[in-house]
Amino acid sequence: MKQFIVEEQFKNLRLDKVIAKNYPELSRTNIQKLIENNKITVNNKIEKASYKVLPGDKISIEEIEVKPVDLKPQNIPLDVIYEDDDIIVINKQKGLVVHPANGNPDGTLVNAIMALCKDSLSGIGGELRPGIVHRLDKDTSGLIIVAKNDKSHINLSNQIKNREIKKTYIALVRGVIKENEATINMPIARSTKDRKKMAVSKDGKEAITHFKVIKRYDKYTLIEVKIETGRTHQIRVHMSQIGYPIVGDAVYSNGKNPFGVVGQMLHSAKLTFKHPITNEEINLEAPLPKYFLEVLNKLDNL
């Protein structure tokens, strides 16, 4: 049980905010879950997250026991780019799902990380599992960070929230882009026509994508992409919206795929972030996968 008395300086602050200030190791999601599960009381009474605290209020937080999730560690080969006691960075292969979900109960990056890291796992959210800080689509390859402990998880989550983690992708798109570089600023929301898809929508969340041309081919363009925001399917939706869908994208293009690749040709090539414990700047790169290089080689020889 954690307890503290509200000081004068926190007068009229929301309950969730005052808890976050007193316990920075608790994530916003953590605090929200604790409040929703009636694990937080004010003067021994249940209050909402929006409750405005008063000096002298006694806040009590019942800690949630970390429980192992019903997931099996699986020895799935992983390309480890960087690892220490706090984080591990994987060059994820195309076709590997990040999180277990309906239809994908196992065979995921989480299962592989559990086998690799064993007892060194994050307990965020009351579950003993690897701290997946951000995601990549199943058929997007490249760099993904995993936090090994709660402190690293919260720090990296805050870096993402504050747009401090720099992500650079390489993509091959259909069509020849005239501009050498451009910025796409179009909000993205869940599609109203197909709930499995995302779409540009005026009611969506802000989504900003920067791209520049690396090389132009006869009917294709190789581009470098940097994103300020991390919306679901952001790069795929934005490039399709402006008329240059990613080669192999079965969801956001019209299906033309002369190279026979499975899934979009999109690779998370570079990551720059501050180490969550040492604050040292980390710069990592992952080479293009073999199939990607083979397609570029074919285009070079057309």
Image (tube, rainbow, N blue to C red):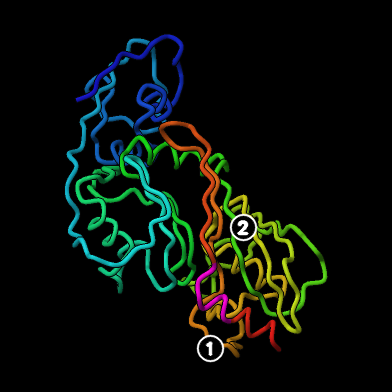
* Disc 2/disc 1 C-alpha distance (Å): 36 Å
Number of the front mark, 2 or 1? 1
Looking at the magenta stretch, what is its main secondary structure?
A: helix
Rendering coords of residue 118 (x, y %): 21, 51
Residue drawn at (69%, 75%) of the image: 244
Residue 290 inside the magenta-drawn segment: yes
Residue 133 percent coordinates (x, y):
41, 49
**Mark toward the start of the polypeptide (2 vs 1):** 2
Left or right of residue 20: residue 4: left
- At label 1, which amino acid type do we have? Gly
Residue 10 vertical placement versus 163 (above, below): above
198 with respect to 222 (left or right): left
Residue assigned mark 2: 203
Check the image and report above or below for 296 versus 59. Answer: below
Q: Residues within 10 Å of mark 1 (few under 14, many from 20)?
A: few
Q: Are marks 2 and 1 in contact (CB under 8 Å)?
A: no
Kindly identify the amino acid type of the residue bearing the numbered disc 2: Asp
- Circle 2: element type: loop
Question: In terms of image quadrants, where is residue 6?
Answer: top left
Is 180 left, or right, of 133 in this rendering?
A: right
Residue named by callout 1: 260
Which label sits on residue 231? none
Check the image and report above or below for 149 versus 98. above
In the figure, 57 relative to 186: above or below? above
Considering the image in quadrants, where does the N terminus appear? Answer: top left
What span is in magenta?
288-294
